[in-house]
Every structure is written in structure tokens, then in C-alpha cells.
Amino acid sequence: MNRISLIRLLIRKRKLNNYLEIGVFNGKVLFRVKATFKIAVDPAFQFDVLRKLGKTLLNPYNLFNRYFRKTSDRFFAEDAPALFAHRKIGIALVDGMHEYQFALRDVENTLRYLDDNGVIIMHDCNPLTPEAADSFEAWKARDFTGQWNGDVWKTILYLRSTRPDVHVFVLDCDHGLGVITKGTPESMLSYTPEQIADFTYADFDRSRSEWLNLKPAGHAHSFFDS
Ligand SMILES: C[S@@+](CC[C@H](N)C(=O)[O-])C[C@H]1O[C@@H](n2cnc3c(N)ncnc32)[C@H](O)[C@@H]1O
């Protein structure tokens, strides 16, 4: 299971057609999604018109993609209210800036426009090394080399501690796929925002399974079957 197969599973099982991707890079995921309404947000898309054309020939759904070359914060402030006024988000892939406060704003903003049946997938929730969980500045100092998941994991901790209206778990695959849906949580945590801000990678490593509500990849099938 990876983010692409999870998105396909959701389109198949939940018949969700409106797709939002925050942080698109070269479009590896975006261009493969078969959904009728696709919104792409990234301040620095890494593809040109020829790649778009090629990907549209391979997957005609790409003809109708809407591209927003800006940060997700600007997108939610300037475009989202009109764009989602009559059409809710079915599936969102949150994969932009991998720092906790950014990822959290992306999830909370997306939740405002999420269909009751919709699903947010958040990439990079389960860093496997301290380096992968570094700050953006530390990754930049390494010249953007190596795996970087940042501290997106804190977003899961925050949602599980503060939101009795959302159900959250993380699939143990593809760097940790957070799955966020509307509804009663399976269980909650009781950390304050101050505690979450102070937690280190070592704290996370000791408690990752409990904090993330970590599930085997196959859990996606049983969860979305029910
Ligand atoms: C890891 S890549 C996304 C990969 C893509 N979703 C995939 O699955 O192949 C992260 C992207 O987030 C973008 N990004 C960085 N800061 C952002 C922000 N504030 N808002 C939206 N996107 C951002 C970067 O430009 C980069 O292209």
C-alpha cells in the first residue's frame, strides 16, 4: 500500500471524485489520480507544459486540473472559499511543507471543506530516523539531501489530543500515511499544545505506535469496507 494505491482504493470504495493535493512537486501522484475535479497547490511545481501534455494523453482526467502556484496558506485564504462553495473535497493529499504548524493548518483548513464522507491522507507521519524528522533548517543545511519527513507526526498527536470530532490513524507504509476522517475517534490522547511542541524525536520513538494509532497497511481495506 502507498499513497497512490490508497487514493485508488478510496475512489473505488467511496466513489469520491473531488481531489485536492497540497504539495505536488513533479506530479507523480496528481497525474495518476482518476478523478473528475482535481486541484493542485504548490508554490514551485516541478513540471512544464510538455509533461502536462504527456500526462494528459496518458490520463485524460488531467485535462481539467486546476493549478494554484502558491502556498497552501494563500490558497486557503484566496481561492478555497469560492472553489469549494458548492463542491466539497472528497480526497485530500496533504504533502506540502513538512513542518508541524504548516501541516496542521493544511489539515484544519481542509477539514472546513471536507465532504462528510471525505478522507484526508497526510504523508510523512512516521519518520524512521532522527535525521528524517529534522527541522527544515537542518535539512536545508544538508543541502536537501536524504529523506525528510519533518515533524508532521506532531500534527497527528495534536489532532488526537484536541479533536473529538475526527477519527485518526496512521498506516504503517509509505513513510506513514495519516488517515483523517470526520467522526468519533477510536481513542484520544491528552497532551497540551505546549507538551506537543516540546516533544522530541526520542519521545516519539518511544511511543510511536500509541501516539500515531499505527495500523498495518491492510487496515485500510477493512476500515473502508465497513
Ligand atoms: C514532498 S513534495 C510533494 C510530493 C508529492 N505530493 C508526491 O506525492 O509525489 C513537497 C512539495 O511541497 C511544496 N511546498 C512547500 N511548501 C509549501 C507550502 N507552504 N504550500 C504548498 N506546498 C508547499 C514543495 O514545493 C514541494 O513540491
Image (cartoon, grey):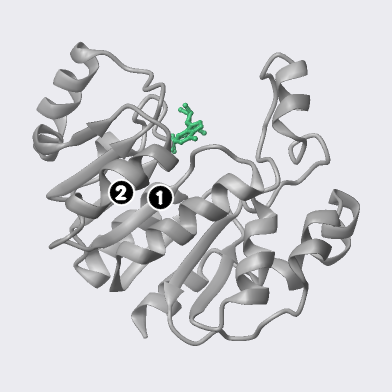
* Circle 1 residues within 10 Å: few <14, some 14–19, many ≥20: many
* Amino acid type, residue under disc 2 in the picture: Leu
Q: Mark 1 points at which residue?
A: 93
Looking at the image, which residue is at 89% across and 59% down? 203
Residues marked 2 and 1 touching at CB (< 8 Å): yes
Q: Where is residue 69 in the image (x, y as percent from the top left)?
A: 32, 27
* Left or right of residue 173, residue 81 in this image: left
* Left or right of residue 133, residue 221 in this image: left
* Circle 2 residues within 10 Å: few <14, some 14–19, many ≥20: many
Q: Position of residue 57 (x, y in %)?
A: 10, 26
CA distance separating discs 2 and 1: 6 Å
Q: How many labels does the image show?
A: 2
Secondary structure of the residue carrying numbered label 1: strand
Q: As displayed, is residue 86 above or below residue 129? A: below
Looking at the image, which residue is at 80% across and 41% down? 129
Q: As displayed, is residue 27 above or below residue 185? A: above
Secondary structure of the residue carrying numbered label 2: strand
Quarter of the picture holding the C terminus: bottom left
Q: Is mark 1 within 8 Å of ligand 1?
A: yes
Q: Name the residue under label 2.
A: 20
